[in-house]
Amino acid sequence: MTDTLAVRHGAILAPDPRRVVVKLFVPGEDAALVRSRARALIDRVAHLDDEETGRLLRETFDRFGTRHRDLDATFHHHYDLVRHRIARGRDLSPTTRLLIGAYFSHEYAVEAAALCNPSMVAHPDQTGLIAGQLRVAISLRQIGEGHLSSIGFATAVLGPGLRLTVADRSGPPVVGQRTAVRHRRDLLAAGLTEVDCDNEITATVLHALPERYDEATFDRVIGDLPPDLLSRSTGPDTLEQVRRTNAASYATIFPADTALHQRVLWPAVPAEGNGMEDARFVRFTGESGPLYRATYTAYDGRRIATRTLASVDLRRFDSTPMRGPGVRNKGVALFPRTVAGRHLALCRADGETIGLTSLDRENRWRRPVPLHAPRDSWELIQVGNCGSPIETDAGWLVLTHGVGPMRRYAIGALLLDLRRPERVIARLPGALLSPDEAEQDGYVPNVVYSCGALVHDGELWLPYGAGDNRVGFATVPVATLLAAMVESAPGGRDG
């Protein structure tokens, strides 16, 4: 009934197999029985004569140079990663080193399989616009070979009115580089608590570390641990756990001259080894000014983990794990500001119910308060959020997703009390957006799904993944959406 409220726009973001990045390739390491063939390959390249080496390198640059940024530096880097396989004292020419780097490289099409699950926030650059326009940054789940997900971006301009202009995404994609990160002692403590690692070694480390610290300080503190503690039977395992927990936080930075749509957040720690999924970005307003924050699902091939991103400018991103019972499943979405001094998030800790969790003093997300359980026919399998709550005068507008017969996903809506978000004050009686005939087919059929919308000039702009394959856009006036909602039953919880 309410599905007619949302109006689809003609703009589509489709997966582009030409968007490729260069990754390290080590022959033999992709086999079931791992046996590196690196040394033999290096020897074969090194035995090529100078003429053949030069010709092969020129052909490689001619064929691939325009598809990538600074391919020369990438080949140098990949050569450095395998140079330990070269016999000591063996002198290789600069051309041979570059060619070895080329042989240890391969292209990966980041979105060859699918492009889906977008979120939308105001872009950090609002210059050059006319009245009624807003430039937005759109995060994207990019899926390539082997169902490996990374996070990409697009840019669009909304307005005036219902006009939507999606910017061109040309130019080579660029994977961010790891950079120095300032660690937080409280996050290290929360991580150790999460795995029940509390003994005299961890207590000594936490006591010695300052509130914020760098890698050099961490290494010094570890190096200064008393031998009497290290010699205990639990010492080696504890040290390994402390190092692993500390290394879970990292930072990524992109060159200043790259456009947002060229930036690719690629898995950088073991927890993300098989993908970074469904980033839910929000522009968070706090005491120190606006900050872009996002939650996403990290997947290592067996387990999932929820992590956060933080960025001032969408150029440098700090990534940290989230801890606590409230974030032990997919679909966490942060509120855009604190409420009564509390940091809040929507979650689905039990896998099927929308809940509300808050951050405690130990930086752990508490056990959630249930808000909305499956109740209507289109959502009986499970419900979850479709991004961060949107603040309106009437309350916190929460876009939801529900799963019905034949695993068909649709999008709905709830309204939470502004001051007490534990209270559900209204809900949409049916779906706001369901898969139409054109959206029935895709990488995953019968799915419409979003990771975050925004309001501009009284209009709700909803980017959504269709069939887990491409991205579409829909709009509905906020006033119309609110008027279509019905009050929830007394008690403040829905379902």
Image (cartoon, grey):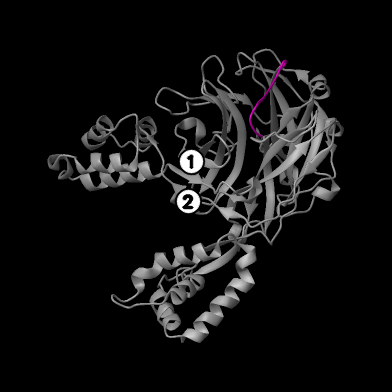
Q: Is residue 43 above or below residue 13?
A: below
Name the disc covering residue 268, or none. 2
Which amino acid lies under the numbered mark 2 shown in the image of this protein? Ala
**Residue occupying the point 64% across, 64% down:** 67
Q: Which residues are magenta?
A: 386-394
**Residue occupying the point 31% across, 42% down:** 242
Quadrant in the rendering for residue 182: top left
> Which residue is identified by label 1?
319
The answer, for residue 376, to whether it is visible in the render is yes
In x, y percent, where is residue 94? 43, 73
Q: Is residue 32 above or below residue 147?
A: below
Label 2, secondary structure: give it.
loop
For the N terminus, which image quadrant?
A: top right
Q: CA distance from mark 2 to mark 1?
A: 10 Å
**Residue occupying the point 42% across, 85% down:** 47
In depth, the one of 322 and 106 nearer the eye is 106
